[in-house]
Amino acid sequence: MDHKRILFIGDSITEWGRFEDEANMGENYVRMIRDYFAVHKPDQFPEVINRGIGGNRMTDLVARWQDDVIAHNPDLVSISIGVNDVWRQVDGSNIEQVYPEQYEKLLRQLIDQTKSELNAEIILMEPTIIAEDVQSEGNQKLVAYVEAVNRVAKDYQLTVVPTHQAFINYLNSKRPLPLTIDGVHMSTTGNALMAKTWLETVVK
């Protein structure tokens, strides 16, 4: 892997703390990945950009893609989105819903736009979890979005980081520590699992 500029985009799971951080990085899986490169690949240390924004759904990424991705001309773009698209269906929110068909259509639109304007590798991350219960309503609804990510990745021959599967595997284990602080936002353990899964998938 030899990328000089890596950009991560997503919702609050990606953003977590970046607006309070002078480095605009935050306390999240993105920081852990950046620190891995600093420790293990100091001679190939890339510029790491965090463009996560809390509350974002797929429609929000579409609205800001030009400014927050294309304008930065990254060598690699890592996309993590989908939890809010589902969470807003189960938390009683009145905002317009983004259902799996639209989610997939818009994801394809973003990939097409990126491929037409950049020479960047695109990495798709599966949406993680909604509640630390495999059988929760949120996790059941999330399956269609995870399937959409994998379907799109297969069609475009993109790498998928199996974060949802990694989280489900952990939930089915003895789980010595919680992955989240509220069922959605990551604990340090959840961030560590996200970073580990990303690195094992992307950094060969």
Image (cartoon, rainbow, N blue to C red):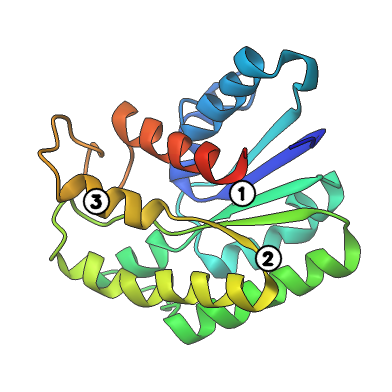
User: Could you give the CA–CA distance between mark 2 and mark 1, rounded to whole angstroms?
Assistant: 13 Å
Res 10 seen here: yes
Q: Is residue 167 above or below residue 181?
A: below
Taking 118 as reference, is 143 left or right?
left
- N-terminal label among 2 and 1: 1
- N-terminal label among 3 and 2: 2
Q: Nearer the viewer, residue 146 or 11?
A: 146
Residue farthest along the front direction in this orientation: 204
Residue 145 appears at what percent x and percent y? 42, 73
Q: Which residue is mark 3?
A: 169
User: Could you give the CA–CA distance between mark 3 and mark 2, rounded to whole angstroms?
Assistant: 34 Å
Q: Which residue is mark 2?
A: 63
Residue at x 41% of width, y 51% of height? 163
Taking 30 as reference, is 131 left or right?
left
- N-terminal label among 1 and 3: 1
Residue at x 32% of width, y 69% of height? 142
Three-letter code for the amino acid on which mark 3 is drawn: Asn
Q: Secondary structure at mark 2?
A: helix
Quadrant (top left, top right, bottom left, bottom right) of the N terminus: top right
Residue at x 50% of width, y 71% of height? 150
Residue 131 appears at what percent x and percent y? 19, 53
Which image quadrant is residue 93 in? bottom left
Please rate how many residues cluster around mark 2, counting C-alpha atoms within 10 Å: few if below 14, some from 14 to 19, many from 20: few
Q: Which residue is mark 1?
A: 9
Residue at x 59% of width, y 63% of height? 60
Three-letter code for the amino acid on which mark 2 is drawn: Ala
Which image quadrant is residue 178 in? top left
Three-letter code for the amino acid on which mark 1 is drawn: Ile
